[in-house]
Image (cartoon, rainbow, N blue to C red):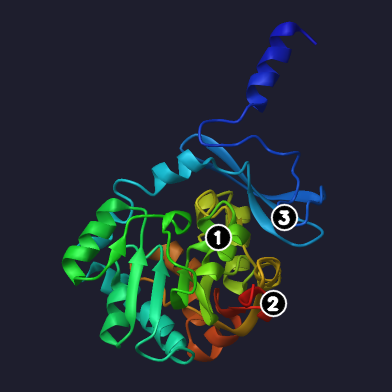
Amino acid sequence: MSQKLATALEELSKPTIGQIASTGCECPMCRSMATRVKFVKVQDEQRWTLRKCRQCGLHFTDPIPQPEFLNQCYAGDYHHELQADGATEYRFGPKYQRYLNRIAEHVPPGSRVLDVGCSTGLLVKMLCDRGYRAEGIELNSASATWGRQHYGITIRECGIGECAFAPGSFDAIILADVLEHTLHPRQCLSAIGQYLTPDGLAFVAFPDINSLESRWFFLMAKLTSTSWLWKTCHMPLHVWEFTPKTALACFEAAGFRLVEFQRSQDAPGNDATGLLRFISFPSEIAAWPVVATRWGTQMEFVIRRRSEQASA
């Protein structure tokens, strides 16, 4: 092999901006080396691979994004479209109402609730209106500022690791479409466990990468060689893509036990037309209530620290 070719291959093997070099394709959860490539996506001239562990089933982004890359993604204009009167209500209102109803089944009004990654703060506002002592934390300064000014609620600009809340500060903590974005989900769960009261609950929600809807769009993306059609796969912003099995394994490893599990499905938007509208018909079927509760893509967990963890 010529020196020029060897140098070129070495350069190609290096991680591009925003990536950490692959650790030999080792599964971050079970440390097995038996992982396989499931999907490849090129975004902004960067190549990202979704791998699946053959042993534990975890789906993960390879290479793992760098913290600086993720911080840049969530800064600036991220969720800028939600910073307008009625925008968050239109996009997330029904979902947040469902979340609120689930939380109310387990935690009475008057309880202290923290929403992690609260964006513009609509769910915090809805909780406060229902009688909860709720506040949020948010990394994006513009979203946090807009939410404080628009809704008149408390939003701290920090990550879960920098909050410095006193142990046992909250009766419930919400991680709605957040955990899959974190670099260290088990450490994140362990951190919120310290902020919960001994009988406190965590509400965790994120999509199932292996749902019927997700399988359909994966098939369409593969058949058409169009990566964006797999709309339920969000790497690299989703560092992890969970299934019920891998989610429960993550909770267990962080010292939590399952209290309740339910599926749901948001109705698709009306902006799709033509072939895309036809391809999206499974999303419309999945949103039917009788279907959503059994096969919906969104997974909603209520979890509690195990007794030995809560008393530690």
> Which residue is disc 1 drawn over?
188
User: Seen in the image, is 70 located left or right of residue 141?
Assistant: right
Residue at the (53%, 48%) spot, across then down: 236
Which residue position is annotated with label 2? 308
Regarding residue 85, the answer to whether it shows in the image is: no
Q: Secondary structure at mark 2?
A: helix
Could you say which disc has been placed on residue 52 in the image?
3
Residue shown at the point (55%, 87%) measured from the top left: 293
Amino acid found under the numbered disc labelled 1? Cys
How far apart are the two marked residues, 2 and 3, measured between alpha carbons? 32 Å
Residue at 81% from the left image edge and 47% from the top image edge: 33
Give the Cα distance between marks 3 and 1: 22 Å
**Callout 1: 10 Å neighbours few (<14), some, many (20+)?**
some
In the picture, residue 109 is in which quadrant? Answer: bottom left
Q: Nearer the viewer, mark 3 or mark 1?
A: 1
Mark 2 or 1, closer to the camera: 2
The numbered mark, 2 or 1, whose residue comes first in the sequence reads: 1
Q: Which of the two residues, 83 or 51, is positioned nearer the viewer here?
A: 83
> Where residue 142 sits in the image (x, y, percent)?
25, 53
Which SS class for mark 1? Answer: helix
